[in-house]
Image (spheres, rainbow, N blue to C red):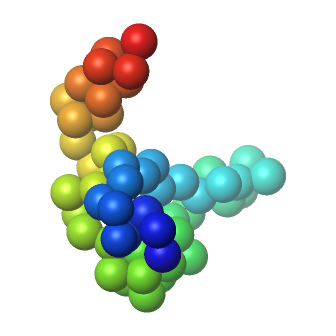
Amino acid sequence: LACKKYKTPVVVSSDAHIAFDVGRFKEAWELVEETGLEKEQILNLDNKKLLDFVENKR
């Protein structure tokens, strides 16, 4: 995966299409584990990290 290779920041989401699936991250976390992404790459594990990233992109 290019995002792993280049340490690209990512956001993990449930990608819910119905209300019942909002907040269900099981499949997303399985993908994180399968790909070997590092927790440091996941922006939305830490509110400050996510907000800092957004602010720096303006």
Residue 17 sits above or below residue 30 on the image? above
Name the residue at the bottom extreme: 34
Q: Position of residue 54 (x, y in %)?
A: 37, 23
The residue drawn where x is 59% and y is 58% is 14
Q: Is residue 26 visible?
A: no
Q: Position of residue 53 (x, y in %)?
A: 30, 29
- How many discs mark residues in the rendered view? 0
The residue drawn where x is 23% and y is 42% is 46
Indicate the quadrant where residue 38 lies.
Answer: bottom left
Residue 50 sits above or below residue 45 on the image? above
The residue drawn where x is 20% and y is 29% is 48
The residue drawn where x is 41% and y is 12% is 58
Q: Position of residue 52 (x, y in %)?
A: 24, 24
Residue 43 sits above or below residue 57 on the image? below
Residue nearer the viewer, 47 or 3: 3
Name the residue at the top extreme: 58
55 left or right of 58? left
Q: Position of residue 3 (x, y in %)?
A: 43, 63
Q: Is residue 41 visible?
A: yes
